[in-house]
Every structure is written in C-alpha cells, then in structure tokens.
Image (spheres, rainbow, N blue to C red):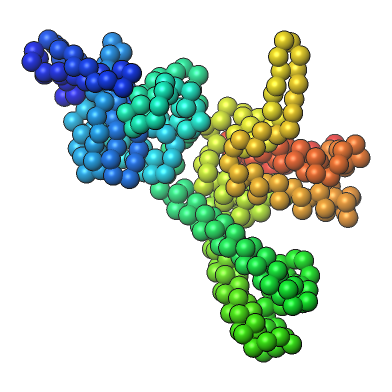
Amino acid sequence: MGWMALAPTSVAMRYTAGVDICIERSHPVKVTTIGLDLAKNIFQVHGITEDEEVAFNRPLRRAQLLPFFSKIESCLIGMEACSSAHHWARELTALGHDVRLIPPIYVKPYVKRGKSDAIDAEAICEAVTRPTMRFVAVKTVEQQALLSLHRARSLLVRQRTQLINGLRGMVAEFGVYIARGLARVIGFAEDILMGEVLDLPEIANEVIHNLCDHLMALHTRIRWYENRLKLVAKEDARVRLLRTIPGVGAVTASAIIASIGDGHQFSNGREFAAWLGLTPANKSSGGKEKLGRITKMGDQYLRSLLVVGMTSLVRQTKSHPERASKWLISLLERKTARLATVARANKTARIVWAVLTRNEPYTPHTA
C-alpha cells in the first residue's frame, strides 16, 4: 500500500509561501514524487501526488526515515548529491524506489525565497521532475571504499604541504635555506633525524626536530596509501585498461573508476570532459559565439590528477619528441605549454570515456 490520505476526515499538508495549509481529502491519493532534504538527524520530506498537489511536507528523525519510506508505494525520490546521499540512495533503492541525485547547484534555482528545510525539500521535489535535469550516478559501496583511499591520501598530502611550507618558513627565519621540491625537504628532514644539529638555540632545534619527525611520519603514511592504490590498480581490470593511456597512472585511473564506474552515465566523451570542467565556458549571445577559459565546474580532484599527469607528458614530449604524439608536438609549436597541457587533459578525458565504455585498451593512431 502506498502512502494515502485517510478519507474523509484526514488532512494533507500543503506548504505554500511559508504557510501550512490543511486540505480536506475525500478519497485516497498516491504520492508519486518526493523531495528529500538530507541532514544528520532531522530530515525533511516533501511529497506530491499524481495531480501535482502537495501531500505532505514534514520532518523525520533519522530512525524514522527508512520505516517511513518502507510504507510508501514505489515513487520517484530526489535528493541533493551531498554527504551521505549515496548511502541513502542505495537504501531507498533497495526498498523499490526510483532515487535520483541532483547536483546542489541545479537545485538552487528552484528555491523560491528564504532558507529552511521545508523550502529546500520543496525545491528538490520540483527539480527532480524537470525533463532536462542532470543527475549524479549512485556510487556502489566498492566505489566509495576506493574513494576513501583517495580522500585520505589527499588529506594527508595537503597536511604534508602545509607542514613543509611551515618548516621551510621557520628555518628561513634563522638563515637556513631548503631548496624547492619534495625530495629536498625530505632529505633535510632525514638529516635532522639522523642527528644533524643546526647552529641554532636548543629550543629551535627541538622544534625543528619534532616537525621533521612529524613530516616523515606523514610521508610514510602517504606512501602506504599510494602502495595500497597500486595494489588495487593491479586487481581491477578497468584500471589496467585506463593505464594504457599515456599520462594516466595508477592513482588517476583508480580515482576515475571510483568516481564514474563504467562511464555509461555520460552520453559521449565531451560530456565527461565537461563534467570535469575541462571544456571552455560558453558565453555566446545574439548569434555571436564566444568561448572563454575552462569552466573548472566539475570534480576538482580528478581534474587536478589529469592535469598533473598531462604536465608530466608535456615535459616528456619536450625532452623526447620522438616518443610523443604528432598532435601534441604540433600543439606545442602553436600554443604555450600550460594551454597545451589543459588541451591534452581534455583530449585524455574523452579517451578515458571511450576506453571505459568500449572496454578495450587505448590504441594510439600511427598516422
């Protein structure tokens, strides 16, 4: 049985302009679409009927959420693609509902006025019914487990960078210069831990020793995550396929698999590149086409991994042009290295989509 308004004395709540209006119903109604505003403890659900009338807009505690939806007949449920959204999407899908995740930026235009859970749930319910709306594919538990490796590694890399900058700035106050580059800083830290003492006050040497010890611990932990990612790369056939693409290593390949799976949620390679924010911003009007810089609107982590990989590829092209593709060599003759790097990242994103959807390794053109 679906959720129905009890006849004839029951009431359903309509939320309009911030006012709860009670509507008498003389016959049962079926809820067809629900907007679910996620939270840690108090969730908001906004449901409409097949006649597009509001059936309810009410809060639910965390423990009430699944029992509530288990009593509702299968319907369309919209949620913002935010923290815990993939978990709840899997749970509600298991109950037989059609769950769709919407990027929060696409929900915002449907918020009428103000900011509350009830207004947000109503906006989500409206956005999920739009025929041109774009949705986020629900990730599996395995995808999220793999993503946890990447997120933990990314967190520690940021902490290591902060620590390196702090250490370099601190010793510079005493006239000690550490050359740029991770290897130079790690070498400095190893020397300090091996017993090298700088010609500084005792308290300064103690602080620098502690920071170097912390830096080496972070560096060791990051290496553990990288080795674990390499093990995953050997086990996953799709990761091995992606590694046949020039400039795509184990970390980048596993991050792509964890984020998009088989890639079939995208219609073509350009759509995937646009999702990553690697396509030019379109600012055309009045029949005049004007393309700007890349949008940078998509997954920042994946985009940065691709750009870093292509930066390495461009450097190799300059030092070993005989190994590079003719397309990249020709582009470097006409454009700057940074522009060529981003263009190559865009091209690689399209190749990634083709390799995943066709399930075959990359084969470069020999012509």
- In which quadrant of the rendered image does the C terminus lie? top right
Q: Work out whether 15 lies above or below 216.
A: above
Identify the residue shown where x is 70% and y is 34%: 294
- In which quadrant of the rendered image does the N terminus lie? top left
The image shows residue 345 at horizontal and vertical percentages of 72, 41
The answer to which image quadrant residue 7 occupies is top left
Q: Is residue 116 left or right of residue 203?
A: left
The image shows residue 339 at horizontal and vertical percentages of 80, 40
The image shows residue 197 at horizontal and vertical percentages of 70, 88
Identify the residue shown where x is 23% and y is 41%: 61
Q: Residue furthest right?
A: 333
Q: Is residue 137 at least partly visible in the picture?
A: yes
Most foreground residue, 241 or 127: 127
Identify the residue shown where x is 83% and y is 54%: 316
The answer to which image quadrant residue 31 occupies is top left
Identify the residue shown where x is 68% and y is 72%: 170
Q: Work out whether 192 lies above or below 220.
A: below
The answer to which image quadrant residue 353 occupies is top right
Most foreground residue, 111 or 5: 111
Q: Work out whether 12 lies above or below 205.
A: above
